[in-house]
Amino acid sequence: MKLRDASGKALKAQLLALPYAQGATPSQPWMDTTLGADERTRLLLGEMTQDEKFQMLRSYFGLGKDGGPLPEGAVGSAGFVPGVARLGIPAQQSADAGVGVTNPGGIRKGDFATAMPSGPSTASSWNPLIAYVGGATMGREAWQQRFNILLGGSVNLQRDPRNGRNFEYAGEDPLLGGVIVGESIRGIQSQHVISTMKHYALNDMETRRNFHSVQIGDQAMHESDLLAFEIAIELGKPGSAMCSYNKINGIYGCEHPYLMNQVLKQEWKFPGFVMSDWGGVHSGSKAALAGLDQQSAGEVFDATTFFDQPLRLAVAGGTVPQARLDDMVSRILRTMFLHGNFDNPPQHQPIDVEAGYAAAQRTVEEGSVLLRNEGNLLPLADSVKRIVIIGGHADKGVIGGGGSSMVGVTAKGTNAVPGVMPTTWPGPVIFHPSSPLEALRAERPDAQITYVDGRNPAAAARAAAQADVALVFATQWSAESVDLPDMQLPDQQDALISAVAKANPKTVVVLETNGPVRTPWLAQVPALLQAWYPGIRGGEGIAALLTGKVNPSGRLPVTWVVDESQLPRPHVPGLGFNPKQPAVDIFDFDIEGANVGYKWAAAKGLVPTFAFGHGLSYSSFAYENLQVSVEGQRVVASVDVRNTGARAGADVAQLYLKLPQGHTTPIRLVGFDKVNLQPGEQRRIRIEAEPKTLADFDPTAREWKIAAGTYQLQLGRNAAEPLQVVDVQLQDTVIR
Ligand code: BGC
């Protein structure tokens, strides 16, 4: 697939219509906006004292140390670097994160933001424009809340459904994840806000994240997690990257010369700066020489502020050359020039609440996945007049993930269900005030819709027996810094679903989870909708999908395994909140290597509950006449897609490459296209394969190479069932 610009011109113009300011003065020539970022940086660097340079290299915890006052000038958020007034260098104010602008504990009185749906929701849209608009919404709101850096753009691959932070990421596939996160980054940076892509790299599990090491070979890491980063960088050009807590093959992410210096900066030519994760720094000169440019909030989270006194000594003593120090500062300043931090400084303004709602709702509507719909139970027919909604606090709101990314303060207030444990870090457990019950009542005023909390399965079953349809809402909370113990829905929700389904065969389950869970009741339940963590318009979006006002078009960005036995690591000691279990210190990612998710399933002949890419519509689509043209690394498929159903809807055509024996990976997603069609409408679409997904990474030659041979291109609606296939001959080709 050719990586392309997803934004329309009009949208871009509207989003970019921000004031321009400031010109040069003779004493500050770097303020001349007609000069390029490199030249402005050179001019400014030449004027800086050594102290002013060092000031750039460390941020302070923007929320204050040990509950004390905020650093002077800090807006109140994750990170703060004071500016240099004498030279007109603005402060760096950074806020979390990827699902909206956070306001921890409501510290910034009066500020609120749009709680966007979680990362897998955006990824499930398979729609780059959704990701771009979501990113632009967050970027805009960050800028309006006085931030010039947003710590968003998270593209760690989902290797395990138990990873506590999957809700911040974009699924298991490097192409889909890279495109979605790349577009989100582009959206953020369209608003004069730097995006920090993270967590670099392979921070794919949270258990003992500050201590564990992931073990993985060079080729495998390039063909999996690193490829996702590479694609996201190519598309989004993030100004900054955040190195991760974990070790990779025994070396901390923030002192990894191979990952930071060689791969990121030399081979990928990343011109931006690397900041550490909060508490991810273990050395001064070692980290600086490995490629770390800025230490984040070390005075609170690290053993010491390595990038202050220790680094000053190292530079004075020549261990770290002055040239490297200047490079660190230049990378930061250049990024700030490039992304408007000097010329378009943030202005404190109220956010556009309605625009935020529109972006959030569109994402839920395109990003929720209809997994099952036997007998077309959905959309709810007009004849369905008695509906009972059960469980999940669906009368009050929708659940969100915990940790630094949690958007707790919205225009509609804070937590709709306070007091659910844990109430402290990585909690509180949050329910965004967007009630599915109220939203469904608004959509279906003709129906009698009641709510039962589900704590008593027998009472819920009795209510279900009286209804035409029962809708069970099941939730699974997940958070940063801790993995889920297993794939089971917590709090006996499986028993609740079974009891309800037994009482009423017309039972629909709506899941609000971090990712795939076990579904032991599936055969009893005709309809299943995965809504992930659906954000501040979750209730409205879910209601629109259940009633058919919106036709579902989401597709899974992950493989929905049956249970843990289908994972590369079925049993991992120490997961969850159970300190009694011995904890893991090595995650052996070499087990699956680059075969993450559907590739693992294909390699092992596993049949998951739902394949990667799966998702239903209220309409149906047909493919005909797949043709493929090959010209070196340019492989283009075209196919007729027809809406054969009675409703307008969107289909996601997915192009996979089946590799011959001898490759480490049996199958890869190489391109996709989401297409909207009216009933009966047919369109010929083109999908250009992303060249790197046709190739293997050669770690010795440091190149992506297509190996000559016969390959099969498969067009389908998921990774497991090809619908149209064509054999192609590929020649030996080095990707350029
Ligand atoms: C998280 C980062 C986050 C940072 C600042 C860390 O704990 O891993 O994703 O940006 O905190 O809040």
Image: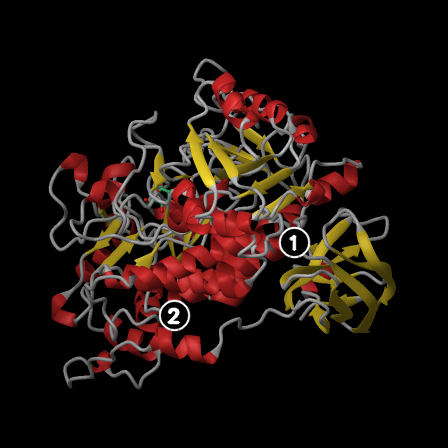
Callout 1 secondary element: loop
Does 207 sit above or below residue 198?
above
Q: Is residue 148 visible?
A: no
**Alpha carbon separation for disc pair 1 and 2:** 35 Å
Residue at point 43%, 42% (across, down): 436
| Image quarter hosting the C terminus | bottom right
Residue at point 56%, 20% (across, down): 495
Residue 250 is tagged as none
Could you classify mark 2 by the number of other residues whose Cα lies within 10 Å: few (under 14), some (14-19), or many (20 or more)?
many
Residue at point 11%, 42% (across, down): 69
464 or 327, nearer to the observer: 464
Does 629 sit above or below residue 33?
above
Quadrant position of ligand 1: top left
516 or 727, nearer to the observer: 516
Q: Is residue 215 visible?
A: yes
Does 457 sit above or below residue 542?
above
Could you classify mark 1 by the number of other residues whose Cα lies within 10 Å: few (under 14), some (14-19), or many (20 or more)?
many
Number of disc labels: 2
547 or 162, nearer to the observer: 547
Answer left or right for 538 relative to 521.
left
Task: Give the residue number, with chain letter if any, for mark 1.
Answer: 618
Answer left or right for 30 relative to 457.
left
Q: Amino acid at mark 2?
A: Ser
Counting residues from the N terminus, which is met first, the one under dot 1 or under dot 2? 2
Q: Position of residue 58 (x, y in %)?
A: 26, 51
Q: Amino acid at mark 1?
A: Tyr
Q: Position of residue 603 (x, y in %)?
A: 78, 40
Task: Give the residue number, with chain letter if any, for mark 2.
Answer: 190
Q: Are marks 1 and 2 in contact (CB under 8 Å)?
A: no
Query: What scheme was used to colour the molecule?
Result: secondary structure
**Disc 1, ligand 1: is the CB inside 8 Å?**
no
| Image quarter hosting the N terminus | bottom right
